[in-house]
Image: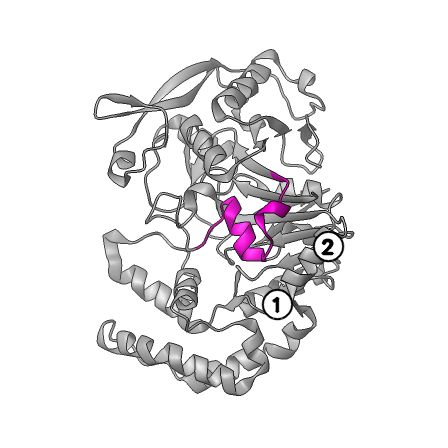
C-alpha cells in the first residue's frame, strides 16, 4: 500500500523537512496531520533556503499536492502570509488542499496562550505562544471554530460567543485583562473566508480515494515523538499527536492503509523548550554541536538545547510508532570528534534502565550511561554511498541502527537537498 508516515523520532527539529522534500518528487500527496505554526521545517533547494511553518514541505515539489489535514490547527493570517511569501519567490501554491474540519487559531487563542504562560511563571511549559494549546483545548471542549464555519456566519457568531463567554470571565477576573469583543473576532475571521475558499476541501475523501487509486501519499508529522501529548515527556509536550497513530486521526485514513513508518533521527539530540533531557550538554561540546549544527529553532528563533545521541529514546520511538525505517540526519555535524559518546541506557536510583521509564519522576532523575564510539575527521559531505563514509562513521551508523531497533535507510551528510546517502528505498 503506497501510504507512508514520516515523523520525528526525538523532540522535533530532526530534519523532517529535508526528508519529506526528498520524497516529494516520488509521491503524489504530502499531508500535514497535526500541529500548527509551532512547527518549523528548513528545506534547502539549490542555493535557496525555505523556512516552512504551517505548510507541508511537499509544497516545494511541483508534482506533489500538499494537504493540510483535519488534525492541524490553522492560523489563517500565518497561512496566507506563508503562501504569499512562496508565491513571491515563484513557488506554485495553487494545488494546496485544506480540510474544512481543521480548527482555526484566533487572536483570542494567542492571547490566552501568552497570559497563561506568564501566569505560570517558573512552572511554564515553554510554549511558542502561538495559540496552539488553547485551540486544541477548545477543540476537545467542543467550542472550537472550524474552517467550514467561515461559510455560515450565523454558526460562526454562535460559536465565537460560546468560546468567549468563559474566556472573558477568566481574562477579566483572573488575569485582570479586558474582555474580548466577539463581534470584532467574527469580523476579523470573515475577512479570511474568500481567500481560503479555493483551498478548502473534503481532504479525507480525497486522500482515501488517492490511496485506493494507487497514488503515493506521505503523511508528515509536525513535531517529534517525545512531544506527543500522550506518549511524550508530559507535560512538556505539544497539544496533539505527532506519533504515527496521529496520522490516522489527523487525516482520516485507517491504519490498515499505512505501509511504512519512517522515523527521522538526528545523529545527536536536541530539544527546544522546557522539560527533561538526560543527555543535555552544558559544556564546550554542547556549544560546538549548537554552532556547527546551526541549532536555532526555525519557528521560535530560540537556541536548541544540545546533547549526545540517546538510544533509549530511539528504541522508544521505534516501539510506539511501529517504525519500519530510520532517516539519520546531520551525521556531518559530528565530524572532528575523536570519540563520540552514545547514551545506551539510564541510571535511575542506582539501577540500569534500558527502556524509557513511564514515570515522569524517574525520567527527570535519569542519568545517561554512555558508550564511547571512535570518531572521524574526514569530510563526509561529498559521500554518495555508504561505502564512501570513513570506517568509523560507518561503524557509528551501524551501532545506532542496532541500538535503535530499525534499519537506517538514509543518511544526511550535509544540509543540501542532494547531500543524502540512500541505502534502502522508502517506496
Q: What residue is pinned by disc 2?
A: 210
Residue 42 visible to the viewer: no
Work out whether residue 194 or residue 233 is closer to the camera in this orientation and state it: 233
Q: Is residue 9 found left or right of 235 in the rendered image? A: right
Q: Position of residue 281 (x, y in %)?
A: 36, 30
Q: Visible in this render: residue 418?
A: yes
The spot of residue 326 in percent (x, y) is 57, 32
- Residue 166 located left or right of residue 343: left
Residue drawn where x is 32% and y is 37% of the image? 358
Residue 258: name its quadrant: top right
Q: Quadrant of residue 377?
A: top right
Residue pointed to by mark 1: 80
Q: Residue furthest front?
A: 256
Whichever of labels 2 and 1 marks the residue nearer the N terminus, that label is: 1
Residue 406 drawn above or below residue 376: below
Please, what secondary structure does the residue beneath circle 1 have? helix
| Nearer to the camera, 221 or 215 | 215
User: How is the protein colored in the picture?
Assistant: one colour
The verdict on residue 412 being magenta is no
Instruction: Give coordinates of residue 136: x percent, y percent.
Output: 43, 63
Q: Residue at x 34, y 81 (%)?
A: 165
208 or 393: which is nearer to us?
208
What separation in Å lies between label 2 and label 1 (alpha carbons)? 26 Å
Instruction: Classify 179 as above or below 53.
Output: below
Identify the residue at horizontal 64%, vertical 45% (top origin). Answer: 43
Q: Mark 1 packing: few (<14 Cα in 10 Å), some, or many (20+)? A: some
Which residues make up the magenta segment?
A: 240-260
Q: Please state the horizontal and vertical placement of residue 411, each as a whole percent of the image.
A: 62, 28
Amino acid at each position: 500500500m503506497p501510504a507512508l508516515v514520516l515523523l520525528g523520532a526525538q523532540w522535533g527539529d530532526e530534519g523532517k523537512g529535508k526528508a519529506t522534500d526528498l520524497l516529494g518528487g516520488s509521491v503524489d500527496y504530502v499531508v500535514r496531520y497535526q500541529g500548527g505554526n509551532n512547527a518549523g521545517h528548513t528545506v534547502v533547494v539549490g542555493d535557496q533556503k525555505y523556512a516552512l511553518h504551517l505548510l507541508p514541505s511537499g509544497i516545494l515539489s511541483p508534482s506533489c499536492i500538499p494537504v493540510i489535514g483535519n488534525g492541524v490547527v490553522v492560523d489563517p493570517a500565518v497561512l496566507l502570509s506563508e503562501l504569499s511569501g512562496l508565491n513571491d519567490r515563484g513557488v506554485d501554491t495553487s494545488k494546496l488542499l485544506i480540510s474544512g474540519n481543521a480548527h482555526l487559531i484566533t487572536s483570542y487563542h494567542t492571547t490566552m496562550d501568552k497570559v497563561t504562560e506568564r501566569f505560570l511563571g517558573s512552572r511554564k511549559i515553554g510554549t511558542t505562544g502561538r495559540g496552539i494549546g488553547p485551540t486544541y483545548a477548545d477543540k476537545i471542549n467542543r467550542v472550537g471554530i472550524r474552517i467550514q464555519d467561515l461559510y455560515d456566519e450565523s454558526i460562526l457568531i454562535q460559536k465565537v460567543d460560546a468560546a468567549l463567554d468563559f474566556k472573558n470571565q477568566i481574562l477579566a477576573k483572573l488575569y485582570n485583562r479586558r474582555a474580548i469583543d466577539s463581534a470584532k473576532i467574527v469580523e476579523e475571521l470573515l475577512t479570511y473566508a474568500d481567500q481560503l475558499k479555493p483551498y478548502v476541501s473534503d481532504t479525507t475523501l480525497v486522500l482515501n480515494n488517492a490511496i485506493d487509486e494507487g497514488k503515493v501519499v506521505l503523511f508528515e508529522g509536525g513535531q517529534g515523538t517525545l512531544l506527543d501529548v500522550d506518549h511524550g515527556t508530559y507535560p512538556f509536550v505539544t497539544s496533539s499527536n505527532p506519533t504515527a497513530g496521529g496520522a490516522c486521526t489527523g487525516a482520516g485514513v485507517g491504519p490498515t492503509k499505512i505501509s511504512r513508518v519512517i522515523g527521522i533521527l538526528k545523529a545527536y539530540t536536541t530539544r527546544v523548550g522546557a522539560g527533561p533531557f538526560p543527555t543535555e550538554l552544558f559544556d564546550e561540546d554542547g556549544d560546538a554541536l549548537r554552532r556547527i549544527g546551526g541549532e536555532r529553532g526555525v519557528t521560535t528563533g530560540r537556541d536548541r538545547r544540545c546533547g549526545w545521541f540517546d538510544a533509549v529514546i530511539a528504541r522508544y520511538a521505534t516501539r510506539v510508532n511501529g517504525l519500519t525505517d530510520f532517516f539519520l540526519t546531520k551525521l556531518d555535524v559530528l565530524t572532528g570528534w575523536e570519540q563520540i559518546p552514545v547514551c545506551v541506557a539510564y541510571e535511575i536510583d542506582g539501577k540500569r534502565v534500558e527502556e524509557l521509564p513511564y514515570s515522569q519522576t524517574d525520567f527527570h532523575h535519569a542519568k545517561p550511561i554512555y558508550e564511547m564510539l571512535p570518531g572521524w575527521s574526514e569530510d563526509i559531505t561529498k559521500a554518495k554511498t555508504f561505502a564512501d563514509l570513513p570506517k568509523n562513521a560507518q561503524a557509528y551508523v551501524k551501532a545506532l541502527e542496532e541500538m535503535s531497533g530499525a534499519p537506517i535507510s538514509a543518511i544526511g551528510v550535509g544540509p543540501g537537498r542532494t547531500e543524502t546517502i540512500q541505502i534502502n528505498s522508502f517506496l
